[in-house]
């Protein structure tokens, strides 16, 4: 998973967002394919099958398959009424997400943290037919 913040460097000075574009990079050819645009948190699954990212606009996590035939993101936490971001963040910027706790074997599930104090997590499948 490669990143590029070139388009956002100028605005970084006044909004502090830290956003960048995320690319899948073929290490054999060097060819890169844009997979996520203008986000600040994304992680590639250990098996390389999924990229999970956090969208500050709606405080939700999404999963995107690295398969070229299934490019649509799947909302993982959008309908859950608990914060997946740092509630104690007291800075004039968007609160960062708590993050990902890990992955199940074969990238079957992703474990997402939802409470900093207790370090709780919920696991999510990457498909819409859960």
Image (cartoon, grey):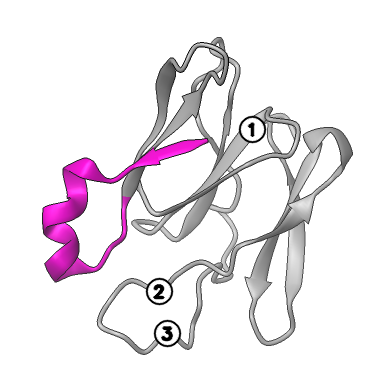
Q: Secondary structure at mark 3?
A: loop
Q: Secondary structure at mark 1?
A: strand
Image check: 60 left or right of 49?
left
Which residue lies at the image location 46% right of the left edge and 36% below the top edge? 2
- Residue 35 percent coordinates (x, y): 43, 28
Residue topped by disc 1: 50
Specify the quadrant that holds the C terminus: top right
User: Label 1 neighbourhood size at 10 Å, few (<14), some (14-19), many (20+)?
Assistant: many
- Residue 22 percent coordinates (x, y): 41, 37
Q: Is residue 64 above or below residue 80?
A: above
- Residue 113 falls in image quadrant: bottom right
- Residue 102 percent coordinates (x, y): 76, 55
Asked if residue 111 lies in the magenta stretch, the reply is no
Q: Is residue 6 visible?
A: yes
Q: Earlier in the sequence, mark 1 or mark 2?
A: 1
Residue topped by disc 2: 95
Q: Earlier in the sequence, mark 3 or mark 1?
A: 1
Res 59 label: none
Asked if residue 3 lies in the magenta stretch, the reply is yes
Which residue lies at the image location 68% right of the left edge and 35% below the top edge? 126
Q: Which region of the structure is painted magenta?
A: 1-19
User: Label 3 neighbourhood size at 10 Å, few (<14), some (14-19), many (20+)?
Assistant: few
Residue topped by disc 3: 89
Q: Earlier in the sequence, mark 2 or mark 3?
A: 3
């Amino acid at each position: 998973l490669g990143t590029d913040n070139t388009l956002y460097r100028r605005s970084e000075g006044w909004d502090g967002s830290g956003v960048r574009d995320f690319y899948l990079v073929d290490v054999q050819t060097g060819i890169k394919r844009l997979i996520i645009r203008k986000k600040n948190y994304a992680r590639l699954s250990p098996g390389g099958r999924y990229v999970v990212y956090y969208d500050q606009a709606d405080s939700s996590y999404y999963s995107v398959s690295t398969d070229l035939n299934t490019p649509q993101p799947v909302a993982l936490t959008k309908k859950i009424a608990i914060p997946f971001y740092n509630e104690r963040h007291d800075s004039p910027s968007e609160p960062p997400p708590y993050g990902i706790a890990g992955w199940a074997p074969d990238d079957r599930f992703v474990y997402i943290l939802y409470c900093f104090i207790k370090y709780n997590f919920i696991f999510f499948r990457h498909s819409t037919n859960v």
